Image (cartoon, rainbow, N blue to C red):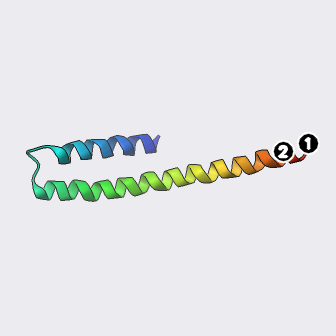
Amino acid sequence: MKLEENIAKLTELAEKTESADVTVQEAIESFKQGIVLAQQCLDEINGYKGQLVELKTQMDELNNDR
């Protein structure tokens, strides 16, 4: 669930940054927050990738036992 929340926050930050009334300082702060959120998303995605690789390995072992 955290991944979806972080993606929603990233979307909000992008929309805020694209606003005509945002200051340069606010845009920079939004960009910094976005980098942190993007890294958290990538970390979580890589965790899912690891789980999927492990599950695939287990499935391949089951198929080889037949």
At label 2, the amino acid type is: Leu
Q: Residues within 10 Å of mark 2 (few under 14, many from 20)?
A: few
Q: Is residue 20 left or right of residue 12?
A: left
Q: Is residue 35 left or right of residue 30?
A: right
Q: Picture coordinates of residue 20 (x, y %)?
A: 9, 44
Residue located 19% across and 59% down the image: 28
Q: Is residue 45 left or right of residue 59?
A: left
Q: How many marks?
A: 2
Residue located 43% across and 51% down the image: 41
Q: In terms of secondary structure, where does tag 1 sit?
A: loop
What mark, if any, has residue 66 been given in the picture? 1
Task: In this rendered view, identify the residue nearer to me: 44 or 60.
Answer: 60
What mark, if any, has residue 43 been given in the picture? none
Q: Is residue 62 above or below residue 47?
A: above
Instruction: Kindly identify which residue carries mark 2.
Output: 62
**Rendering quarter of residue 33:** bottom left
At label 1, the amino acid type is: Arg
Q: In terms of secondary structure, where does tag 2 sit?
A: helix
Q: Picture coordinates of residue 63 (x, y %)?
A: 84, 43
Disc 2 from disc 1: Cα separation: 7 Å
Residue located 62% across and 54% down the image: 50
Asked if labels 1 and 2 touch by Cβ distance under 8 angstroms, the answer is yes
Q: Picture coordinates of residue 62 (x, y %)?
A: 84, 44
